[in-house]
Image (spheres, coloured by chain):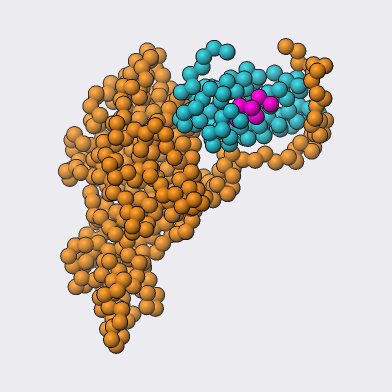
Amino acid sequence: MTMLDLDSMHSVSDCSQANIQMLVYLLQHSWRTEQWLYREAELDELWRSAEVELESARKLYSPDGSRLEAYVQLCEACISAHNLASEGCLDESARVLEQASRLMERYGIW
Amino acid sequence: MSATRAPWEPKRLSRFNGDPVESKERKVIPVISAEENEMLTRVGSGTAMGELLRRYWVPALLSEEVLDNDCAPVEVQLMGEELVAFRDSDGEVGLLERHCPHRRASLCYGRNEEGGLRCIYHGWKFDVKGRCVDMPTQHGTPFRGKALTRAYPTRDVAGVIWTYMGPADLIPPFPEYHWLQLWPGQSKEFKVLEECNFLQAIEGGLDSAHAGFLHRGPLLSDSIPADTAPKLQVQYTRYGYRYGAIRDLGNHKLVRITPYIFPITTVVPPAWQSEGGQMSDNDFDGARVVNVWVPRDDYTTWHYQYFYNPKGEIDIDARIQEAGLWVDENYRKLRNKDNHYLWERKSPSYSGVEGIVTQDHMANESQGPIVDRTKERLGTTDIAVIAMRRLLLRNAIALQRDGIEPTVGRFHDLPFSNITSQSISIDSNEDWQRVLPLDSQLETAEIS
């Protein structure tokens, strides 16, 4: 992955694998307290996107159970990662997100 | 990459697979928990936030409310505490527990005369330090001269009576801000009741993105840059933090730098002079607004403002008009939630409401007395809000749980007079923190 600026926030317009991986990278490399804030805000954005996906999946006439489950887990991962980032546990936060990323992959969501 | 499961990957572990009903029932934990929201917003004596806020000097009332020596005493409510203020025969301002320690009658009906406030019920009299100086109904007066009622220290500075409500042995230095040291005519203080919890009021003051919508209108139409999604960057300091709201305008950036002075103060940067954002190089040019949000109780807030210009005279009438600072004798807005702020859909302003402060209060009060933060969804322009909550929470928890006194904004060598806001125009590749570096005495590497 190319170098990303750790001292500014990055746009997280959806909960695609590309964005999740970008956040994992940012979490793994951030260390200053100001950077925690940026990561926290980016995780908020990711969570918001995941929630939108979850709600739209729920509203389908015939909901796909595995897709629903994937987004439920992603939402939970976002919150967990967010709270860890806010406490400065960035490595752990990255690990939680990485696990979620693998899960999404497993569910076939890219 | 294939979207299907690879042979070496484990089977899906989810017990919810194919069962959307069960998934629906799963509850997602909010980012701000109900417990944290309680901790952030409750301000009474003994609460975590209440104790933290009591470690700082705060405005208690305007000097004009107790203008003359021996004037009528005034009801004051601060952080849920019922108090009474009076100016004694020597011009000293007292701030005492409102109810007489004898039989609890209100001292607001007391007689303010000859160096103290006398309860009209039995004539007990108290000086500004809370000492009982006369007990005419008691034989022997065993308590005379003893501090019988709670009294808070006061400072009468730049039109505001300030007080400190924390432990006497932990009193911090008085914040000698530069806007408190100006000539009359350069600065004007205002007070207005905001009918919501103090925290959501501060959050509004740290949310640069709202200006492009809520305050859009004829008064600001030329002064708000086109970029409605500013990028925010936070820099922690020894007084709290400052943040830059950066708006990208192609070949240059406009940056509005707002200090958040822990725990309840912000300094609004000067308005843009033109679409091109041509700003003075001098840090202290241009009119600014200081906001201080003091909790009255859990559900209402005293919003104090200083409007000042360090380099010239201010136009007070124009400021009242611009901000919509029309208040009644109790400092309640004339345009308030009971009359829907005189909201008009066909008003020339975007919000339908006149006056920047009224617009802010409308938005904050419409969130409810205390926002349920478990239901909110923050975005990237909320970074300054997040930073403020983190600072408050960490310090409140440290104080309550571990007995660690806050240091941020309480350092004895903190040069309060060097704290200011700024609006600057810089090249696209420049860093605002390098263009306008912090005074070295305000810098901090890390903050608790």
- Find the residue positioned furthest to the bottom: B139
Quadrant housing residue B217: top left
| Shade representing chain B | orange
Residue at 42% across, 56% down: B79
The reply to whether residue A39 is in sight is: yes
Majority secondary structure of the magenta segment?
Answer: helix
Q: Is residue B122 magenta?
A: no
Quadrant in the picture for the C terminus of chain B: top left
Q: Nearer the viewer, residue B349 or B28?
A: B28
The reply to whether residue B350 is in sight is: no
Image position of B87 (left or right of B446): left
Quadrant in the picture for the N terminus of chain B: top right
Image height check: is B186 above or below B112? above
Image height check: is B242 above or below B58? above
Q: Nearer the viewer, residue B326 or B267?
A: B267
Residue at 40% across, 47% down: B406
Q: Position of residue A19 (x, y in %)?
A: 61, 20
Image position of B237 (left or right of B13): left
| Shade representing chain A | cyan
Image height check: is B215 above or below B48? above
Residue at 27% across, 55% down: B161
Q: Position of residue B357 (x, y in %)?
A: 37, 42
Task: Magenta stretch: give its range.
Answer: A93-99
Residue at 33% across, 38% down: B267
Q: Position of residue B187 (x, y in %)?
A: 22, 43
Q: How many numbered dots are placed on residues in this image?
A: 0
Q: Position of residue B11 (x, y in %)?
A: 82, 25
